[in-house]
């Protein structure tokens, strides 16, 4: 295909691939769209007439009795992958534009580089390591997975929001989540797409049949794994969830005047307690408030401390409260979850580990604040927390509880999420504050991501947000209840406690890391082959 046609097609395929993410949720679009990219990178085109044999190849022009063919070189692979990335990330993370259209453009333009990397790796390996030519679907899938692995780490802690794995909660491949984790399932989605491409253009019936059989095996096995029975619960905890809402007059980039959001959560908690008592409901064992349900540090602000204390004393049970805490150094802050006990106050805390660059902190602060003045709007610099993502606390009746808590953006990071069950979490909660992304696809994407986490850990997850999508997700990833966005709400859930770790939590990071390492070795092998070929080329004699 001519480049002038291939480039816009790559862009369109990327956008189509992005439709697999919530709220659209066309999971099959991700598989088909990536399969289209695999075809472009493979360089399969219409049959060319000539006296020589039909050639299908990757790499430089091939000399012979037949017509000269232009293969897909690494530079073209980079361009195709980048255009694919522009369409893909343009669909999946456009919501960043809620904070400024220029921010969305910059982020999408940067993230598309990972698509370019996948395209370059694929074509580089197929050009310089011809022995892998028949395995091009596998090479293409490995290249994409390695780009996802890199994007979760580079730069400034990475940005891994748009992984293929987050499209699978409603499709058969989701059954693989507790077996090989999110990273492994991303690879299976990419492999299925590439095999679908091979099924369409396989040179022989035997190869097409092999592709079809592998696709069927992956899908059927995934579907059967969804039937994997859950172990019996290790008890239950009654959790009250409060979604206090934010001041709608404050605009999308503000949660209102100081202490307003805390007062709103106090008010909704009061309504919840009154309703539960009138209905004769048993009291909750704990109450969950969302991230940033207090915009002030209660240890520094007496009014905020009084508001939260009033809520806790009225409830008579412990509360997990999301606050903005000052420190540890001057000009710094942390996003914190406090375990607040009646008549006592905060007795334990967790600080958010994974922070959004240019949203919660400014990397290379001196450089960016000098040359990009708008970065100063970030304000106090957030500092990441350390240690495991669990709290060892006691409920109102003295029952000990190991609580694993994930705060918003952290959901995208395997190591942070897995740290909860690695450290013995019995109950998993998620706190989030999505008001700046209200009316976009971001809340639905995050809720789908939480469903994926529930499936791979085989745990029920309770979600509390300030005004977005709060609810309960079971260990199969099914949504048992969800609130309405932009409305105050409260809920009462009996949540099963869990124990242990799934194979996906244990081997998932190694599986994805192994694929990335193998892709790096393929690139290295291609580099060695390229150097050898250049050294072996005879010198021209004058």
Image: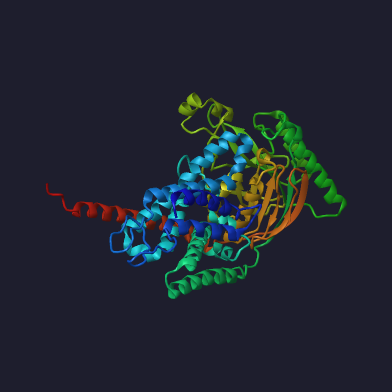
Image coloring type: rainbow
Which picture quadrant has residue 95?
top right
In x, y percent, where is residue 455? 60, 60
In x, y percent, where is residue 326? 59, 31
Direction from residue 192 to residue 442 in the image, left or right: right
Q: Is residue 302 visible?
A: yes
Q: Residue furthest left?
A: 542
Q: Nearer the viewer, residue 538 or 280?
A: 538
In x, y percent, where is residue 513? 43, 55
> Which residue is painted at 46% across and 31% down in the image?
364
Say which quadrant the N terminus sits in: bottom left
Q: Residue furthest right?
A: 278
Direction from residue 456 to residue 293 in the image, left or right: right
Give the total of numbered labels.
0
Direction from residue 254 to residue 155 in the image, left or right: left
Q: Nearer the viewer, residue 85 or 434?
A: 85
Which picture quadrant has residue 236?
bottom right
Q: Is residue 415 visible?
A: no
In x, y percent, where is residue 448? 63, 54
> Which residue is painted at 80% across and 39% down in the image?
267
> Which residue is painted at 40% across and 55% down in the image?
122
Q: Nearer the viewer, residue 505 or 80?
A: 80
> Which residue is painted at 33% across and 60% down in the image?
67
């Amino acid at each position: 295909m001519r480049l002038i046609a291939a480039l816009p097609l790559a862009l369109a395929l990327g956008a189509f691939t992005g439709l697999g993410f919530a709220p659209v949720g066309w999971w099959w679009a991700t598989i088909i769209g990536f399969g289209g990219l695999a075809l472009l990178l493979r360089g399969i085109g219409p049959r060319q007439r000539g006296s020589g044999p039909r050639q299908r190849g990757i790499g430089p022009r091939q000399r012979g009795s037949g017509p000269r063919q232009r293969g897909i070189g690494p530079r073209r692979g980079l361009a195709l992958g980048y255009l694919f990335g522009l369409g893909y990330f343009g669909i999946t993370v456009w919501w960043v534009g809620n904070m400024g259209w220029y921010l969305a453009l910059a982020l999408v333009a940067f993230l598309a580089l990972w698509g370019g990397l996948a395209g370059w790796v694929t074509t580089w390996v197929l050009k310089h390591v011809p022995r892998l030519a028949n395995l091009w679907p596998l090479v293409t899938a490995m290249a994409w997975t390695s780009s996802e692995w890199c994007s979760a780490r580079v730069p400034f802690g990475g940005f891994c929001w748009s992984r293929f794995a987050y499209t699978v909660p409603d499709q058969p491949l989701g059954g693989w989540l507790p077996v090989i984790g999110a990273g492994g399932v991303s690879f299976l989605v990419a492999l299925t797409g590439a095999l679908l491409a091979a099924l369409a253009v396989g040179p022989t019936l035997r190869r097409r049949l092999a592709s079809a059989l592998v696709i069927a095996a992956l899908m059927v096995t995934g579907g059967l794994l969804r039937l994997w029975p859950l172990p019996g619960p290790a008890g239950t905890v009654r959790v009250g969830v409060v979604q206090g809402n934010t001041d709608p007059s404050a605009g999308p980039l503000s949660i209102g005047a100081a202490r307003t959001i805390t007062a709103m959560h106090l008010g909704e908690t009061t309504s919840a307690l009154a309703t539960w008592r009138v209905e004769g409901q048993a009291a909750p064992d704990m109450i969950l408030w969302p991230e940033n349900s207090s915009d002030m540090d209660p240890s520094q602000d007496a009014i905020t401390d009084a508001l939260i204390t009033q809520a806790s004393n009225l409830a008579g049970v412990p509360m997990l409260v999301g606050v903005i805490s000052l420190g540890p150094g001057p000009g710094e802050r942390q996003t914190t979850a406090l375990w607040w006990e009646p008549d006592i106050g905060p007795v334990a805390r967790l600080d958010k580990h994974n922070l959004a660059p240019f949203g919660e902190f400014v990397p290379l602060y001196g450089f960016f604040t000098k040359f990009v003045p708008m970065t100063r709007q970030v304000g106090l610099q957030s500092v990441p927390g350390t240690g495991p993502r669990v709290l060892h606390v006691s409920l109102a009746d003295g029952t000990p509880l190991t609580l694993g808590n994930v705060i918003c953006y952290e959901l995208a990071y395997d190591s942070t999420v897995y740290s909860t069950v690695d450290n013995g979490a019995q109950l998993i909660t998620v706190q989030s504050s999505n008001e700046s992304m209200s009316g976009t696809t971001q809340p639905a994407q995050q809720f789908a991501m939480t469903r994926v986490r529930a499936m791979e850990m085989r745990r029920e997850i309770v979600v509390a947000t300030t005004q977005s999508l709060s609810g309960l997700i079971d260990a199969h990833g099914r949504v048992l209840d969800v609130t309405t966005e932009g409305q105050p709400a409260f809920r009462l859930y009996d949540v099963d406690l869990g124990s242990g770790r799934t194979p996906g939590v244990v081997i998932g990071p190694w599986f994805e890391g192994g694929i990335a390492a193998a892709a790096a070795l393929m690139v290295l092998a291609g580099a060695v082959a390229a150097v050898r070929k250049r050294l072996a080329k005879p010198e021209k004699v004058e």
